[in-house]
Amino acid sequence: MNEIIYFGAKWCAPCKTMKVVLNDIIEKTGVKVTFHDVEEAVELSQMYGVRSVPALFREDSMGNILDNITGMKTKQELLDFIGVSLDD
């Protein structure tokens, strides 16, 4: 399964909203998401080329970046990006 790398910031309202949605997705699917604050993980953020938040990167098991998205996304958009579905 792919891993999701999430970049956000404490001051970012959309980041807070998306983090809640992502935590729900994690709880229901078991997908692995690693959360990073851009102000605390400056070098990592630069390595990924993060220019705006929220930003998500999808990596394969070898750590290769497969895709990325930025900005506020709906739950369905996040599910589609991650490649999982919920049976709500």
Image (cartoon, helix red, strand yellow):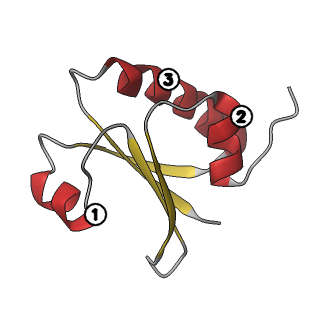
Kindly report the distance in space between the C-alpha atoms of the residues bearing marks 2 and 3.
14 Å
- For the residues carrying marks 1 and 3, which lies nearer the camera in this image? 1
Kindly identify which residue carries mark 2: 76
- How far apart marks 1 and 3 lie (CA) works out to 23 Å
Q: CA distance from mark 2 to mark 1?
A: 24 Å
Question: Can you identify the residue that label 1 sits on?
Answer: 48
The percent coordinates of residue 38 (x first, y second) are 19, 43
Helix, strand, or loop for circle 2? helix
Can you say whether 2 is above or below 17 in the image? below
Check contact, mark 1 vs mark 3: CB within 8 A: no
Name the image quarter holding the C terminus: top right
Which of marks 3 and 1 precedes in the sequence?
Answer: 3
Q: Amino acid at mark 1?
A: Tyr
Q: Secondary structure at mark 1?
A: helix
Q: Is residue 84 above or below residue 47?
A: above
Q: Badge 3 local density, few (<14 within 10 Å), some, or many (20+)?
A: few
Asked if marks 2 and 1 touch (Cβ < 8 Å), the reply is: no
Does residue 88 appear left or right of residue 40 in this picture? right
How many other residues sit within 10 Å of disc 2, few (<14), some (14-19) or many (≥20)?
Answer: few
Q: Which residue is mark 3?
A: 20
Residue at 34% across, 17% down? 13
Q: Tag 3's secondary structure? A: helix
Answer with mark 2 or mark 3, whichever residue precedes in sequence.
Answer: 3
Q: Please, what is the three-letter code of the amino acid marked with disc 2? A: Gln
